[in-house]
């Protein structure tokens, strides 16, 4: 039964996560509250690992969550669930693409989806900021902010803008720092 639930839940995640891996995060937070598969703290770790490993972040997170819930087969089932809607939609789109290639209605629909996807990504980013840089149970501004994490974030942003180094360098460096220095 766990495998069917995993598949169906990740089909929902895949179906409503237009815009990539970050758009899956609101749905994954709901899963963290609904099932004992992973906690919100573990979800942050899953995001970090999903972003720093090759492959689609949503699929990487689905595999991890599925593995935690149902072992290796659970990881496979969750991955199949999250990609299933995309495969179906791509197959349908490929069949009818020629008919709607120059459709203003289709262009308008995709134009209208962009703000919703942007909002989903911003809400996800705010959730990550709340759990990494802000301490919600604080009483003063000094206690509210995780100053070492904020400083590290600032250093990384500065270095990315100043040195134009490939992002993988910063991802790898952040992974090493995260392993050795708990925030």
Image (cartoon, rainbow, N blue to C red):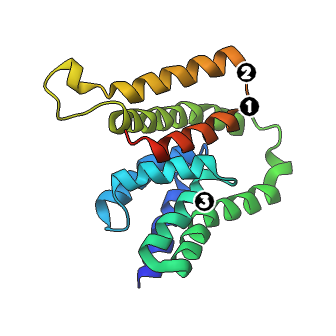
Per the image, the residue denoted by label 3 is: 59
Q: Position of residue 47 (x, y in %)?
A: 50, 49
**Depth order, front residue of 30/174:** 174
Answer above or below: position of 42 versus 139: below
Which percent across, then down, holds residue 119? 47, 32
Q: Position of residue 52 (x, y in %)?
A: 62, 47
For disc 1, the marked residue is: 166
Q: Residue at x 56, y 25 (%)?
A: 156
- 69 or 112, which lies in front? 69
Residue that badge 2 annotates: 164
Residue 111: x and y in percent read 64, 31
Asked whether the residues under the numbered discs 2 and 3 touch, taking CB atoms below 8 Å apart as contact, a structural biologist would say: no
Q: CA distance from mark 1 to mark 2?
A: 7 Å
Q: Is residue 105 visible?
A: no
Q: CA distance from mark 1 to mark 3?
A: 23 Å
- The answer to whether mark 1 and mark 2 are in CB contact below 8 A is no
User: In the image, what residue occupies the spot 32% across and 29% down?
Assistant: 146
Residue 8 in the image: above or below residue 143: below
User: Are the residues flagged by discs 1 and 3 in contact, CB closer than 8 Å?
Assistant: no
């Amino acid at each position: 039964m766990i495998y069917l639930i995993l598949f169906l839940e990740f089909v929902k995640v895949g179906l409503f996560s237009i815009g990539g891996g970050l758009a899956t995060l609101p749905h994954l937070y709901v899963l963290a509250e609904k099932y004992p598969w992973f906690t919100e703290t573990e979800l942050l770790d899953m995001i970090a690992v999903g972003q720093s490993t090759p492959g689609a972040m949503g699929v990487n997170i689905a595999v991890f969550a599925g593995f935690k819930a149902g072992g290796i087969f659970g990881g496979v089932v969750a991955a199949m669930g999250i990609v299933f809607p995309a495969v179906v939609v791509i197959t349908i789109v490929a069949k009818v693409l020629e008919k709607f290639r120059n459709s203003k209605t289709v262009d308008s629909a995709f134009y209208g989806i962009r703000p919703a996807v942007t909002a989903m990504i911003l809400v996800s980013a705010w959730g990550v900021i709340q759990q990494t840089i802000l301490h919600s149970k604080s009483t003063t501004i000094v206690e509210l902010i995780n100053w070492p994490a904020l400083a590290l974030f600032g250093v990384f942003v500065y270095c990315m803008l100043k040195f134009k180094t490939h992002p993988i360098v910063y991802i790898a460096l952040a992974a090493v720092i995260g392993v050795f220095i708990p925030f």
